[in-house]
Amino acid sequence: MFVFFAFSAACSEESITPPPAPESSVNIIISGNEEPVKPDLKGPSIYLMGKGMPALSSFEYFLDTLADSHVDIVVLAGSSASGGSATPECDLLMELDHVNSCATATVQSQEEANSEELVEIIDQSEIIYFAGGNQCVYVNWRDSNLHYAINQLVERGGGIGGGSAGLAIMGDMIYDGCSGSVRSDEALSDPYHEYISISEGLFELSSFDNTITDSHFSERDRLGRFISFMARISSEKDRDEYFGIGLDDNTSIVIDHSSTGKVFGGYATRLKTTERAQHAEEGIPVTIYGVERVVSAPGETININEFNFEQRDIIDVESGEIIFRNED
């Protein structure tokens, strides 16, 4: 009986042990023309989207800021699409007349981020769009050949952008989500909460000097956590002024080479600190004064680093509690 039991247990254990994972390679799917175009570029231009999928009307405007002829686009993703299509962003963007091709590349490791094939496609394209998902995956591509190729694309006047997680990685500092997702109340109670992980930026975008970005802004009540991030950064980096851009789900912003942006679809919230945080320390609730807020509506044109003083709110945070100075 003992022999039979041992044999059965061994068989059972073997049956639930997964086989070794095969070595993965970059999954690249190309839609449209295989022969790339080489238009004259007017960028760099930036496309920000509050949720994962781009919007056709704002993306068409984005194309107009970038080139007067057809372009090639690469959509980068850190995981496979969960819906019925493996290329949802490209399916949408191929509807635009000025898109010559759209390649979807799923990159799931540092090894894949060093793929020569992937770098070649980036070098032959004019626009990079980061899909929604997990921004921690994107941050882990730092210092790869892919990372270098994207910065080269920006340097030659190309376009860059993303939605949701793809939006979150555009600033000069990044809430990377590598330790979890933090709520506003948690972040205000402790700017070094276990779910807050902040990384240096990935891209050299002059429009986003001293700026952090966030998505799903109103829908997920992210004002408090955003102020906490900015308070921590202002303290760590010894900066009085620091900026934030938070977009609602249906909001997109297109920013041209002169840092002029146009808002589409929904509301964009911009924040600016005017002094360093009084308290932005581990285990202590946030205290910071004089945070300026401007909310921009669809159709508005804005300078990313300038505020309309007639329409601004002033926000103080005392011991983790948000106070609007100009509220009745």
Image (spheres, rainbow, N blue to C red):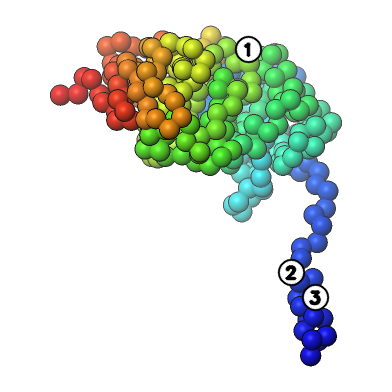
Q: Quadrant of the N terminus?
A: bottom right
Q: Earlier in the sequence, mark 2 or mark 3?
A: 3
Disc 3 residue type? Ala
Q: Could you say where residue 270 lies in the image, as x and y percent from the top left?
A: 40, 21
**Front-lying residue, 302 or 230:** 230
81 horizontally vs 103: left or right: left
Q: Earlier in the sequence, mark 3 or mark 1?
A: 3
| Residue marked by disc 2 | 16
Question: Which mark is in front, 2 or 3?
Answer: 3
Is label 1 in a helix, a strand or a loop? loop
Q: Outermost residue, left direction?
A: 328
Q: Quadrant of the C terminus?
A: top left
Q: CA distance from mark 1 to mark 2?
A: 56 Å
Q: Is residue 31 visible?
A: no
Which residue is pictured at 68% across the width and 33% down the height?
A: 140
Q: Earlier in the sequence, mark 1 or mark 2?
A: 2
| Residue marked by disc 1 | 42
Is label 2 in a helix, a strand or a loop? loop
Disc 1 residue type? Lys
Q: CA distance from mark 2 to mark 3?
A: 10 Å
Q: Quadrant of residue 279?
A: top left
| 180, above or below 46, in the image | below
Q: Residues within 10 Å of mark 3 (few under 14, many from 20)?
A: few
Disc 2 residue type? Ile
Q: Quadrant of residue 250?
A: top left
